[in-house]
Image: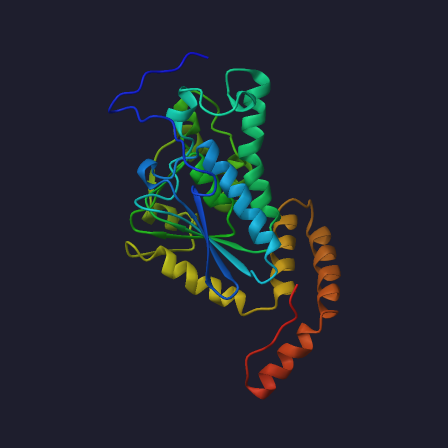
Amino acid sequence: MAKTRTSPTTPAPSTEAPGTAVLVEQVEPGITKLTLNRPERLNAMSHGLIDDLHAALDAVIADRTCRVVILTGAGRGFCAGLDLAETSAGAGSPDRQIGTPAGGMRAQQRITSLVTRMRGLPHPIVAAVNGAAAGGGFALALASDVRIADTTARFNAAFVKLGVSGCDIGVSWLLPRIVGAGKAFDLMLTGRLIDAAEADAMGLVSRVVPQGQAVDAALETARLIAANSPFGVWMTKEVMWANLEVGSLGAAIDLENRTQILSTMTGDLKEAAAAFIEKRPAHFTPI
């Protein structure tokens, strides 16, 4: 694959060291913050960032003390999508270059598996969005369970503007379930940018906060989640996602019923009642 020339307006492909493109930090007991850390590129998705985010999710799963994850971006943006400078220059190993069908499919599956991993994580993910959440960054925000934006946030399904389908990285499944099919068609067919106010109005985000306060607001939400039963939170996330796919109210209730009975076996229901009567914080069973 021929390499493109670089110039002052075409940044060279990224060469970040492994483990530096996503920072993992326990900000409080039970709350882990994952920070996309390529601020000079608005945290665009390089091969290194994709690998580091997979590794960060591995670390979260291995940490039995983690209850909630906050996902955010360093600097002026959340994530500007795929790093086109790296892609056009053919960076990365040959099996992940998009110049061949097999290489392109491997690279595509490596990116899209982030969304299914985030969905399958037992811990809720709260996205703290500032600046651009475009393309793949938009997908990461949608794959989070809660989205909080500051006033600088901008969202778009940029794929259709790049000469490919607007349906990518799970967006065609996630977006209509969050904002409805009509609004999803509008965003995916036009690729237009929407600001934080419009995102709030259509239900894409749960709230908008002043500039620079998205992480603090996400931390407030994370604390509320972490105060609940670990198993109950896990089952809430799992059943909510599952019931977005079932075909009837009856099937949804059947799953709820079984999960509720299973949840009572942890002892957390008795502990919650005792804590309420004794006017103290509950001490729930770890998972």
In the rendered view, would you say 226 is above or below 112?
below
Q: Name the foreground residue: 10 vs 121.
A: 10
Quarter of the figure with residue 40: top left
Residue 184 seen = no
In the rendered view, would you say 54 is above or below 64?
above
In the rendered view, would you say 190 is above or below 88?
below
Residue at the far bottom in the pictured view: 278
Along the horizontal axis of the image, is 133 left or right of 235? Answer: left
On the image, the x and y values in percent for residue 183 come to 44, 39
Query: At 54% across and 28% down in the image, what residue appears?
Result: 108
Count of numbered marks: 0
On the image, the x and y values in percent for residue 191 come to 39, 31
Residue at the far top in the pictured view: 2
Q: Name the foreground residue: 84 vs 211.
A: 84
Residue at the far front in the pictured view: 17
Residue 45 seen = yes
Q: Name the foreground residue: 268 vs 99.
A: 99
On the image, the x and y values in percent for residue 144 come to 50, 48
On the image, the x and y values in percent for residue 128 come to 40, 52
Along the horizontal axis of the image, is 108 left or right of 41? Answer: right
Query: At 65% across and 59% down in the image, what residue appears?
Result: 235
Query: At 43% across and 37% down in the image, what residue appears?
Result: 17
Query: At 50% across and 16% down in the image, what residue appears?
Result: 99
Q: Name the foreground residue: 149 vs 93.
A: 93
In the rendered view, would you say 183 is above or below 26?
above
Q: State the scheme by which the image is colored.
A: rainbow
Quarter of the figure with the C terminus:
bottom right
